[in-house]
Amino acid sequence: MRLAICNETFGDWSFDRACEYARSCGYEGIEIAPFTLGPDAGSIDSRLRQETRSTAQAAGLEIIGLHWLLAKTSGYYLTSPDEDVRRRTGDYLADLARLCRDLGGRVLVLGSPQQRNLLPGITHETAVQYAADVIRRAEPVLADLEVVLAVEPLGPQEGDFLLTADAARELIRQVDSPWCRLHLDVKAMSSESKPIPQIIRENADLLEHFHANDANRRGPGMGEIDFVPILRTLQEIGYGGWVSVEVFDYEPGIDKLARGSIEYLRDCLAKIA
């Protein structure tokens, strides 16, 4: 397991300052929210893509991929009954895959609850079919670039679509592609009825990426969730991917969120070594 952090954690810091600080804390990777680079993927030109990739590399960080894929965009929706909207959204996911690859990443985390929540009159079952249609439209580009789209279940505090890992598995089953896999998030899993280690074990076959945070929306170690059994379970299933810190409550400040999170995770890893 390698430790990473999401770049929006650093607020209005420049990207080079964020990268240098993240590496000084001990992180090896950084995950990017596209809206921190531009209003949409098309506005992020080749110069900025190369500059962003080079800046991370110079700091000793690997750009691992993108998340918040549809946040702060307009005209895209994962579960829309409008075929044209689904076509545009599928095309945009393909554009994001190209951006991800240009930056040196290989994973797209598909969360973005405000662009996937159930619309009036649409059942969850039908919404899954619409979402599968969108992802299948992007699948040829994902396959060509070898970029994995990782479907992220989110808890009820975020929305009403794909609230459990089981629901996400059904969407992945319908897409039926090796380039569509599963992302798990500790905060989201904490809202399920199953224990977090059980969810991880049940989904070991599909697990592509992992976010570390607490149910209180802060970093790992800043709430009541014990990460020792979580990290032990990841180790037991042979997970060799990234554990990426993602927070939503920035009140503790950048230093506490970034340095405090990795220090806690390292302490937990030491206990299971």
Image: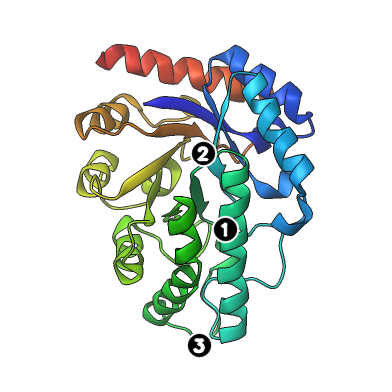
Residue 112 tag number? 1
- At a point 59% along the width and 18% down the height, the residue shown is 60
Quick check: 168 above or below 204? below
**47 to the left or right of 224:** right
User: x, y (%) of residue 228?
Assistant: 31, 24
The residue that label 3 is drawn on is 121
- At a point 29% along the width and 60% down the height, the residue shown is 166
Q: Secondary structure at mark 3?
A: loop
Q: Is residue 6 visible?
A: yes
Q: Quadrant of the C terminus?
A: top left
**196 to the left or right of 186:** left
Q: Quadrant of residue 24?
A: top right
Q: Quadrant of residue 23?
A: top right
Give amino acid for label 1.
Ser
Q: Earlier in the sequence, mark 1 or mark 2?
A: 1
User: x, y (%) of residue 257?
Assistant: 60, 25
Quick check: 2 above or below 83? above
Residue 216 tag number? 2
- At a point 50% along the width and 50% down the height, the residue shown is 109
The residue lying toward the viewer, choosing from 195 and 102, is 102
